[in-house]
Image (cartoon, grey):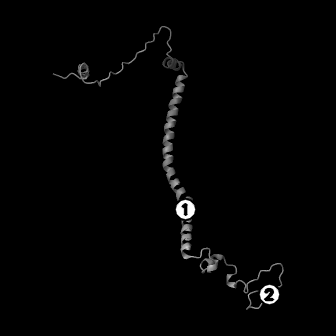
Amino acid sequence: MADPKTSTITRPRRTSSVARPARPRRASDAGRSRVGDLTRPIAIDRRIVRRRRSTVLLGMVAIAIAGALAAALFVLPVQTYFAQDETIVRRQAQLGELDAVNADLAAEVARLRTDDGIREAAREELGYVEAGEARLSLVSPGSLPTLLPDGWPYNVVTDVLALRGATPSAP
């Protein structure tokens, strides 16, 4: 057996040359998780970061990463979920408008499938004229320019245009 005061257990070595600790794991630690290790102080030689300032900085970075993950997993999806109500209302309004336009187009198609609809479309689109009819094209007169330069003869034309555009006053 081993002497309790020595640092290694004297056992016959099988395949390992690693020295074993003098005392085995405490009975109070048997079956416990390592969560308890977080509350115990850690020896300086076993720490990830040796200086206190670096430890605080590392902790702040870990908190920032945890906050970003929480925002990505919880905050953003919840905002999207609540914004969906408004989006659904807008999309339903657009769908209603599109349904109305589709109904109008379906009525127009049904009207154009009749003989009278075909005749009317041929008159409007192609200028179709039946026997005995004459085709007249009327062009609307264009508007005259009213902004003329100052001076003779333009001042006379400006006066005439002003008189034509004026409404007669009652006596």
Q: Amino acid at mark 2?
A: Thr
SS state under label 1: helix
Mark 2 Cα shell of 10 Å, populated few (<14), some (14-19), many (≥20):
few
Q: Which mark is residue 10?
A: 2
Q: At x 52% / y 24%, what residue is drawn? A: 111
Q: At x 60% / y 74%, what residue is drawn? A: 49
Taking the image as shown, residue 27 lies to the left or right of residue 16, namely left
Q: Classify the position of the C terminus by image quarter.
A: top left
SS state under label 2: loop
Mark 1 Cα shell of 10 Å, populated few (<14), some (14-19), many (≥20):
few
Name the quadrant containing residue 46: bottom right
Disc 2 to disc 1, how far (Cα)? 53 Å
Which percent across, then down, holds residue 17?
80, 80
Q: Which mark is residue 2?
A: none
Which percent across, then down, holds residue 98?
51, 36
Total count of labels: 2
Q: Amino acid at mark 1?
A: Ala
Q: Which mark is residue 68?
A: 1
Of callouts 2 and 1, the N-terminal one: 2
In the figure, 32 relative to 85: above or below? below
> Pointers 2 and 1 in contact (CB under 8 A)?
no
Which percent across, then down, holds residue 140?
38, 18
Identify the residue at the far top of this view.
132
